[in-house]
Image (spheres, rainbow, N blue to C red):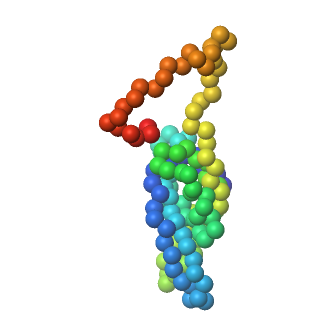
Amino acid sequence: MEIKGKINQVLKPVTGMSKAGNEWKKQEFVIETSEDQYPKQICFTLFNDKLNLLEGLKPGSEVNVSFSVESREFNGKWYHNINAWKVDRLSQEAPFNLPPDFLPDDIPPEPIDNENDLPF
């Protein structure tokens, strides 16, 4: 399954050891859907080698997430996981056409602001 949305939160990675003695890692991230009438927040889980799918992504990034859903029973209660297996960054800027007589020299230089060195 796939869903599009904007990353709301990237949680810290968690590590542990299985009963068999194997080390595991997981990381969760939350997106807010963008194509629903009523946007929803969904928490996805990445395991082991899939954690690198979040590299370069931060809150506000538009993504398309491919995932699978699984449920398991433990002591009479059911637990659910939404496991992401692919995360694609979507273009954040809409394409536009420049006028035919536009030259790169027509762009004015950025103002210098020494008080605020933030890149955005």
Quarter of the rendering occupied by the N terminus: bottom right
The answer to which of 1 and 61 lies nearer the viewer is 61
**What x and y, as percent, mark residue 101?**
65, 10
Q: Position of residue 118 (x, y in %)?
A: 40, 41
Toward the viewer: 38 or 5? Answer: 5
Residue drawn at the location 50% of the way across and 40% of the way down:
37
Q: Position of residue 4 (x, y in %)?
A: 58, 46
Q: Is residue 40 visible?
A: no
Q: Is residue 13 above or below residue 18?
A: above
Residue 91 horizontal/vertical position (percent): 61, 38
Q: Is residue 93 among what the camera can see? A: yes
Q: Quadrant of the C terminus?
A: top left
Q: How many marks?
A: 0
Return the residue found at the far left.
115
- Work out whether residue 77 or residue 2 is closer to the camera in this orientation and state it: 2
With respect to residue 38, does 52 lie above or below?
Answer: below
Residue placed at 57% from the left, 57% from the top?
54
Left or right position of 61 against 90: left
Residue drawn where x is 61% and y is 58% of the image: 53
Query: Residue farthest to the bottom?
Result: 20
